[in-house]
Amino acid sequence: MLTLIRFVVFAVGLSAMSASAMAHANIVSASPADKSRGPSPTAVAMNFNEAVNLAFSRMKLLGPDGKEVATGETVLVPGGKGMTAPVGAKLQEGVYTVDWSVLSSDGHKLNGKYSFTVVP
């Protein structure tokens, strides 16, 4: 019986550790959205399911030629679960890529890319 109790305690502990290890910041929404087509945006924004640490996070906008497009300062959105950067100039027609990385509140660094298309 004591062995069974130890096993149950071990299994519950292992399950709790697995659940917390899987809790990373995931993208909830992005604007412009991935694979969207539309006019030049005035800002690029990403929202996550948990808070992000802006000091160790970044968002770069890459133009159709692969070169970085100047944006304003990236700031946290209210509540800290996202970041946004204003786009200063009207973007020309073409495919743009948002290259991002965040440090989530659980200490995990995540990164990715997504694209959107500017049309007239």
Image (cartoon, rainbow, N blue to C red):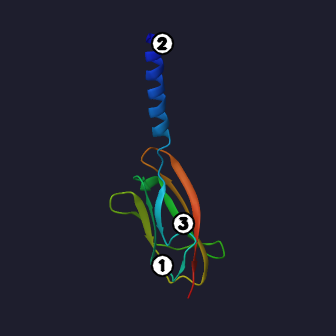
Q: What separation in Å lies between label 3 and label 1 (alpha carbons)?
A: 14 Å
Q: Amino acid at mark 2?
A: Thr
Q: Secondary structure at mark 2?
A: helix
Front-most of residues 26 and 67: 26
Tell me where residue 26 appears, x and y as whole percent. 48, 54
Which residue carries the number 1 mark? 41
Cβ–Cβ under 8 Å for marks 3 and 1: no
Q: Secondary structure at mark 3?
A: strand
Q: Amino acid at mark 1?
A: Pro
User: Does 48 sit left or right of 36 as displayed?
Assistant: left
User: Does 115 sit left or right of 42 as displayed?
Assistant: right
Front-most of residues 18 and 89: 18
Which residue carries the number 2 mark? 3
Which residue carries the number 3 mark? 60
Q: Which residue in the rendered view is the most extreme toward the left?
A: 78
Using the image, tell me which numbered label, if any, was put on residue 52.
none
Nearest-to-viewer mark from 3 and 1: 1
Nearest-to-viewer mark from 1 and 2: 2
Few, some or many residues within 10 Å of mark 1 (<14, 14–19, 20+): some
Q: Amino acid at mark 3?
A: Lys
Residue at image position (39%, 57%) is: 81
**As drawn, 18 above or below 41:** above
